[in-house]
Image (cartoon, rainbow, N blue to C red):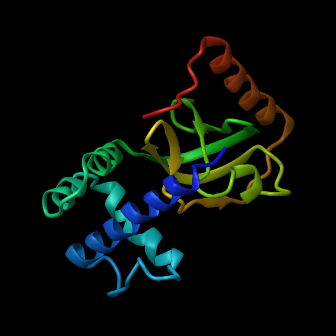
Amino acid sequence: MTLKSEDAALFYELFLPLLNYVNHHYYVTEDIDFTGKRVDAAKAMEVARFLWEQPSIIDDYINENIFPLEEMDILSNWKHCIPGRFIIERHLKKGSIFISTKGESVYLVNGIIDSWEDMLFGVPTPIIVDAVLLHFKDCIITDGLVSVIPVRFGGNYTRSFKDIYMTAKRNGSIIKSI
């Protein structure tokens, strides 16, 4: 599952200028424009990491700019981001299952433009990733700056992750919005 194309465009219209703001105000990396056609992912990740460690920066950004109410709500919700390491346990039609390595919370996560299954084509689950989960409208996405950790899991771990997912499914505790 992915965002509608207009929602994907809106995400980038909000996220990339936010990265510019953070970098301009806090000098995280060299002066770079994240709104151009090509974005340096490593530099964007560095700035985003700084932002997610201090999400209250978003309040300053909102206060210094004028946004329509919907966009202001989206940005405000990002203050409740969930950075961490996650296990992608499986791909479903409605999104991919991310299991937090801290506390075993289970999230249904959508792709922004491509589904997680398409982005990770050929890589068998489970997969471990460093990511930041964000609420966007009525679903969870990442900030698009995800690192895959090259680890292979044995059968016991794979079954353990499956059990965590199945328990969350039975209990109705899969988190679909933040």
Specify the quadrant that holds the N terminus: top right
In this picture, residue 167 sits left or right of residue 4: right
30, above or below 22, in the image = below
State the residue lying farthest toward the top. Answer: 171
Q: Position of residue 36 (x, y in %)?
A: 45, 82
Q: Looking at the picture, how far across and down is residue 58, in whole percent?
A: 24, 55
Q: Residue at x 69, y 51 (%)?
A: 115
Quarter occupied by residue 95: top right
Tell whether 119 sits left or right of 36.
Answer: right
Q: Residue at x 72, y 31 (%)?
A: 161
Residue 69: x, y in percent? Answer: 25, 46
- Which of the 4 image quadrants contains residue 136? top left
Q: Position of residue 22 (x, y in %)?
A: 27, 69
State the residue in front, 167 or 69.
69
Whether residue 49 can be seen here: no
Front in this rendered view, residue 24 or 17: 17
Numbered circles on residues, count: 0
Q: Image quadrant for the C terminus?
A: top left
Left or right of 52: which side holds 160? Answer: right
- Whether residue 152 is visible, yes or no, is yes
Residue located at (13% from left, 57% from top):
63
Q: Is residue 138 above or below residue 51?
A: above
Looking at this view, name the residue that lies furthest to the bottom. Answer: 31
Task: Judge whether 160 appears above or below 126 on screen.
Answer: above
